[in-house]
């Protein structure tokens, strides 16, 4: 976590999943940002480690190649025992770069300037001074089709206030009037549930370059219910606004239980009375967790737990309903890997796994289809004619075809001159 870097993978488009290698044919392209550039946000800050955590990316112009990356920039100041000397510093940050592709590979340029956008305010969103274990991360930006040109950001946060302050309310509990199973507010507070105060934050862009943002009150709060609503996103389909997030069994408050997985809420706009999907459960994709068995942490599982509980669906629902899965723990080594893709059918307030997709509902590993083709012209020419002593595709074709390749060789020679 404290050394994480953002990297990228790429693969050739247009190849059916059945014809790809088992890993989906993805090629690792390396770190996205030049070394050291994301640390510029913390100039003047004392820290021992610095990391790049998740976020999202957008093409700034659908006909161009400028990519805006919104991510979580983090600085840790820790002692030799990995304890915090001072609270971690989380900053939602933007950086701009350019994406390029030719017939051989994909690469990026730019990303040299990193602009801090948002730090928790202590009014809506908890700060490190209020709670050293606070959450402030995972920015996802989008344009609201009901208000063209207006851009919003959702992110994971915690409700502002000092950690351990028992300030949940009756409204936070969410019980219907006269519910015979309802707990009293005092019973909930006595359980210590007030340590769990996750929310899904909201901000609005104040300029067209998306480099200036203003906080708005949270979209959804889970005070006294859960402490993590990770990687939220807004998914808009058929006039409905779906807020998807992931959470964990181990982050629920005392007296509340639920599996690791994707949770969804649906409304009619940005500011809606969002309701949990799927008959009020909110669960969209869950792991085969046995809720009768006590929870263990990801890296210290209860022996009675189903080991499949540590495969998480997922951290992003793509257009068309495709969802990547993530194995959280593989052979006891901290880390993970992609698993088969699944596809959701989403309509109104319900979702189901599409069993027609792939093999019984399981698609290829990392089955992320391309939706457009852009070729970097300079890279394309280099591929054809070669560069720096390397033969291009035309030269290779000429050598393979003997005398029939003479014209190709002459063209190649002319261009190189």
Image (cartoon, rainbow, N blue to C red):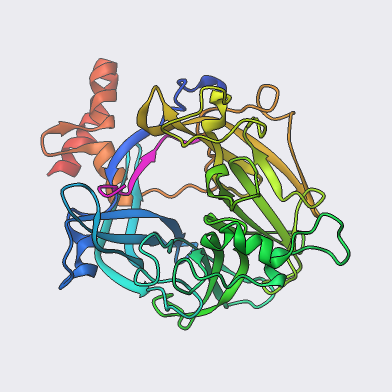
Whether residue 370 is visible: yes
Judge left or right: residue 146 versus residue 26: right
Residue 367 percent location from the top left of the image: 54, 34
Residue 79 percent location from the top left of the image: 17, 53
Q: Is residue 281 above or below residue 56?
A: above
Q: Which residues are magenta?
A: 1-14
Residue, x 63% and y 71% (percent of image)?
144
**Quarter of the image containing the C terminus?**
top left
Per the image, is 182 magenta? no
Q: Is residue 295 above or below residue 56?
A: above
Residue, x 41% and y 80% (percent of image)?
212
Is 4 in front, or is 144?
4
Is 411 in front, or is 138?
138
The image quadrant of residue 174 is bottom right
What is the magenta segment's predominant secondary structure? loop
Per the image, is 11 magenta? yes
Q: Is residue 14 above or below residue 100?
A: above
Whether residue 367 is visible: no
Q: How many labels, in total?
A: 0
Judge left or right: residue 94 versus residue 179: left
Residue 135 percent location from the top left of the image: 43, 61
């Amino acid at each position: 976590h404290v050394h994480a870097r953002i990297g990228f993978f790429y693969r050739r488009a247009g190849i059916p999943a059945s014809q790809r290698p088992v890993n989906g044919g993805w090629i690792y392209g390396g770190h996205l940002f030049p070394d050291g550039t994301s640390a510029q946000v913390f100039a003047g800050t004392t820290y021992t480690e610095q990391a790049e955590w998740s976020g999202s990316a957008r093409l700034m112009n659908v006909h161009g190649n400028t990519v805006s990356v919104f991510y979580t920039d983090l600085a840790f100041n820790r002692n030799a025992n990995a304890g915090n000397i001072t609270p971690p510093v989380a900053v939602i940050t933007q950086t701009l770069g350019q994406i390029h592709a030719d017939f051989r590979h994909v690469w990026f340029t730019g990303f040299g300037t990193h602009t801090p956008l948002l730090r928790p305010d202590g009014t809506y969103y908890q700060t490190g001074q209020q709670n050293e274990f606070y959450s402030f991360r995972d920015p996802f930006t989008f344009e609201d089709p009901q208000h063209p040109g207006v851009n919003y950001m959702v992110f994971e946060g915690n409700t502002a206030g000092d950690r351990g302050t028992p300030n949940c309310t009756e409204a936070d509990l969410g019980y219907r009037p006269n519910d015979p199973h309802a707990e009293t507010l005092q019973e909930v507070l006595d359980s210590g549930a007030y340590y769990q105060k996750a929310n899904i934050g909201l901000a609005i862009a104040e300029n067209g370059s998306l480099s200036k943002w203003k906080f708005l009150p949270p979209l959804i709060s889970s005070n006294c219910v859960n402490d993590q609503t990770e990687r939220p996103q807004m998914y808009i389909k058929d006039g409905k606004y779906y807020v998807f997030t992931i959470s964990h069994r181990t982050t629920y408050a005392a007296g509340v239980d639920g599996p690791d997985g994707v949770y969804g809420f649906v409304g009619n706009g940005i500011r809606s009375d969002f309701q949990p999907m799927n008959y009020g459960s909110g669960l969209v994709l869950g792991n085969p967790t046995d809720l009768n068995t006590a929870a263990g942490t990801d890296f210290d599982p209860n022996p009675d737990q189903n080991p499949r509980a540590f495969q998480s669906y997922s951290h992003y629902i793509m257009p068309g309903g495709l969802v990547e899965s993530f194995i959280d723990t593989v052979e006891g080594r901290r880390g993970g890997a992609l698993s088969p893709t699944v596809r959701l059918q989403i309509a109104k307030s319900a979702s189901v796994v599409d069993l027609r997709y792939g093999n019984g509902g399981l698609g290829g590993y990392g089955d992320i289809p391309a939706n457009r083709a852009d070729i970097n012209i300079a890279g394309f020419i280099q591929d054809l004619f070669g560069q720096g002593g390397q033969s291009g595709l035309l030269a290779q074709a000429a050598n393979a075809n003997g005398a029939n390749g003479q014209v190709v060789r002459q063209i190649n020679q002319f261009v190189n001159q």
